[in-house]
Image: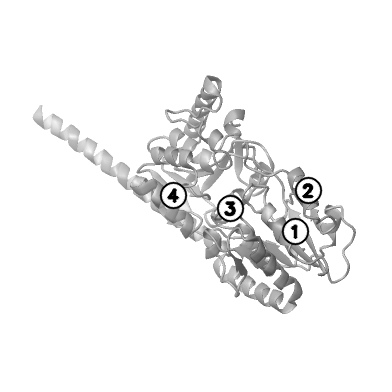
């Protein structure tokens, strides 16, 4: 089987880590299959794909299209239009996008895939428009469609019998069903992590201080960190507001680990505004900015407490699972798909959404209670081993691809049979 994966960016965020997991596990389980990737931008993802042994082509998105989206800005999202093009800035961008679709169609014809899988909203739409009629398309849904009205309308119009949607959580699946109706089949396959990579190896957290430009922490300091991209909804301001409610007398230090990865306008916070908020709240010296880390396992393993603080429903919440896989105590927002990943007070501490007071109280509990940290860490690790070992991905995804392939072959055989019957009827009438 030949599968072509389309991804709009070359950076590595949560969705791209999921893509790498699928490639690694399916490629290992089905070595005779041909898996290849097309990226809309260059970046570390290309190197990661090639390191796994798969071919990776670049088909650069036009600048206006790459910067467009309606997750952070309804205005920019409203510039998407149906009719085979996506207009970002008038006719010039429309022509550029039409040309991109033409190049993508030629690339797909040259690759002759049996199946196309898309990652990200832009890729879902472009993949559905560019795929040959006989080639099925799988949308790997990492986002809620209902919260993006323009994209939701485009996806409804782009979906059809040959589109299959796979959601990363039951919450995302339910939203997709509400949005797409009967335009596409929807099922759930939870993301997973490489448990060996995230296994705690006694990582010393002192390097976090150096990376953040902070003096070495005193012995016994509890390190608490928010590990997230700079997406506007990842809860950086909420995290800072929660920290402001925690006494500076407690032996703890805080970190924001991550950076910007998106090009869409309005999609992410800026470090300058976060630093300004730190100054307003009087948190100087208590919190450091570490920046994006290519190896999240090292960063998470250096923490004592991992915080998830998203301010809108999280489709999945990968950092929650990564924190549990490292055996760290986790504080997470009980909302959306994230709420499906843990049991409150058993494998993590849950907090209501957008509640800085509750988040601060949960963090404080873990700072002052080493037994609670230890208990949650052990229970979370066991849960990660049972539910989120990425080895299960190979069988789940392979079965899905094979099922879609069989359905497609049956449909093609049925169509051929009907055509032959029609020709026979015509000869009989003649």
Discs 1/2, front: 2
Mark 2 vs 3: CB contact within 8 A: no
When the figure is inspected, residue 131 is found, relative to residue 301, above or below; the finding is above
**Horizontal and vertical percent position of residue 268:** 65, 43
Please name the residue that numbered disc 1 is placed on: 299
Please name the residue that numbered disc 4 is placed on: 165
**Horizontal and vertical percent position of residue 151:** 48, 39
Discs 1/3, front: 1
**CA neighbours of label 2 inside 10 A, class few (<14), some (14 to 19), many (20+):** some
Discs 4/2, front: 2
Q: Which circle's residue, 2 or 3, is located before the other in the chain?
A: 3
Q: CA distance from mark 1 to mark 2?
A: 21 Å
Q: Secondary structure at mark 2?
A: helix
Quadrant in the rendering for residue 311: bottom right
Q: Which circle's residue, 1 or 3, is located before the other in the chain?
A: 3
Q: Which circle's residue, 4 or 3, is located before the other in the chain?
A: 3
The image's mark for residue 193 is none
């Amino acid at each position: 089987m030949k599968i072509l994966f389309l991804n709009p960016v070359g950076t590595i965020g949560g969705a791209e880590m999921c893509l790498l997991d699928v490639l690694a596990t399916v490629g290992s389980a089905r070595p005779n299959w041909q898996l290849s990737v097309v990226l809309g931008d260059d970046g570390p993802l290309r190197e990661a794909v090639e390191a796994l042994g798969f071919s990776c082509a670049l088909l650069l998105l036009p600048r206006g299209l790459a910067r467009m989206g309606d997750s952070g800005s309804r205005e920019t999202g409203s510039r998407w239009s149906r009719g085979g093009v996506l207009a970002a800035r008038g006719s010039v961008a429309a022509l550029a996008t039409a040309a991109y679709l033409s190049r993508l169609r030629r690339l797909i014809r040259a690759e002759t895939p049996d199946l196309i899988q898309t990652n990200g909203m832009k890729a879902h739409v472009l993949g559905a428009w560019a795929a040959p009629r006989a080639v099925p398309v799988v949308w790997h849904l990492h986002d809620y469609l209902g919260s993006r009205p323009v994209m939701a309308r485009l996806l409804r119009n782009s979906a059809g019998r040959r589109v299959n949607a796979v959601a990363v959580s039951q919450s995302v699946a339910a939203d997709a069903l509400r949005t797409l109706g009967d335009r596409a089949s929807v099922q759930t396959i939870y993301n997973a992590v490489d448990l060996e990579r995230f296994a705690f190896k006694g990582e010393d957290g002192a390097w976090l201080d150096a990376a953040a430009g902070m003096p070495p922490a005193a012995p016994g300091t509890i390190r608490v960190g928010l590990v997230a991209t700079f997406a506007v909804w990842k809860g950086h301001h909420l995290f800072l507001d929660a920290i402001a409610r925690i006494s500076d007398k407690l032996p703890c230090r805080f970190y924001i680990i991550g950076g910007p990865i998106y090009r869409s306008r309005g999609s992410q916070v800026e470090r300058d505004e976060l630093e300004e908020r730190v100054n307003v709240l009087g948190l100087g010296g208590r919190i450091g900015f570490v920046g994006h880390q290519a190896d999240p396992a090292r960063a998470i393993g250096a923490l004592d407490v991992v915080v998830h603080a998203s301010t809108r429903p999280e489709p999945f919440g990968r950092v929650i699972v990564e924190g549990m896989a490292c055996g760290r105590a986790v504080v997470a927002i009980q909302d959306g798909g994230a709420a499906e990943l843990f049991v409150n007070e058993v494998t993590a501490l849950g907090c209501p959404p957008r509640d800085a007071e509750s988040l601060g109280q949960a963090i404080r509990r873990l700072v002052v209670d080493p037994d609670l940290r230890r208990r949650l860490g052990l229970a979370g690790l066991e849960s990660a081993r049972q539910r989120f070992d990425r080895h299960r991905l190979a069988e789940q995804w392979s079965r899905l691809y094979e099922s879609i392939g069989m359905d497609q072959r049956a449909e093609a055989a049925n169509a051929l049979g009907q055509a032959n019957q029609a020709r026979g009827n015509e000869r009989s009438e003649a």
